[in-house]
Amino acid sequence: MGGKQSKKQTSTELTDKHIALLKANTKYDEKAIRDWHASFIRDCPTGRLDKKKFVEVYQQFYPTGKPDKYCKYAFETFDANNDGSIDFEEFLLAIAASGQGDLNDRLGVAFDLYDVSNDGTIDQKELSNLIIATYDLVGETDRKGDKDPKKRAADIIAQLDTAGDKKITRAEFIAGLKADPVLRQLLAPNA
């Protein structure tokens, strides 16, 4: 019983060691880290963000959309240790990487989101599924013609796949999105 209680305390505590790690891996100073932590604990008193709460947060930002599918992919990307929840460290590192890092880092986070199979490439099915999830998230209902997710995924892969293997590697993804701001806005709007 004592072990469970200390585990619970550790998950909500922000130690000097955690602060040092987060300062070393983000551009946040100690005050910003403490502010983020206070907000995180206010929203997640257990110190862990579960999938349900994660979807609720996205729903606030996209009130007319359906965030469930998109959140499934994003949650799995942010849950670095695959324990079914996001702790403060995972949360802040994901926020920092997707919003603070240099362009390559931010595009790398976007690539990780799309690489659902974790095989180091994005294929047409993965890309199509993420486009559908993104459409659902933002409430996009027009999915005909150029907006058809399968067609759009095929066109994007044809554009970015320099090796001709019908898959996009991390390097192809980053180089392609750096060269094409319109595509970057579509696939990695925060980058």
Image (tube, helix red, strand yellow):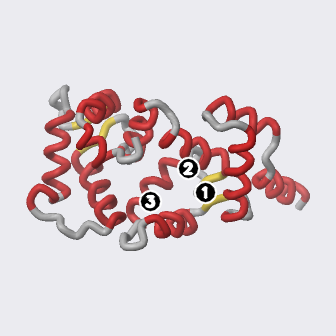
Compared to residue 72, the image places residue 179 above or below, namely above
**Whole-percent x and y of residue 109?**
44, 40
**Whole-percent x and y of residue 173?**
30, 34
Label 1 sits on a secondary structure element that is: loop
* Kind of residue sitting beneath label 3: Lys
* Kind of residue sitting beneath label 2: Asp
Residues at marks 1 and 2, CA–CA distance in whole angstroms: 6 Å
Question: Which disc, if any, is residue 68?
Answer: none
* Among the two numbered marks 3 and 2 on one chain, the one whose residue lies closer to the N terminus: 3
Residue 17 quadrant: top right
Q: Locate residue 45 relative to residue 4 in the image: left or right.
A: left
Please name the residue that numbered disc 1 is placed on.
85
Which residue shows up at 48% across the image and 48% down it? Answer: 77
Quick one: 73 or 119, which is closer to the camera?
73
Quick one: 188 or 78, which is closer to the camera?
188
Please name the residue that numbered disc 2 is placed on.
79
Please name the residue that numbered disc 3 is placed on.
72
Which residue shows up at 69% across the image and 44% down it? Answer: 32
Residue 27 quadrant: top right
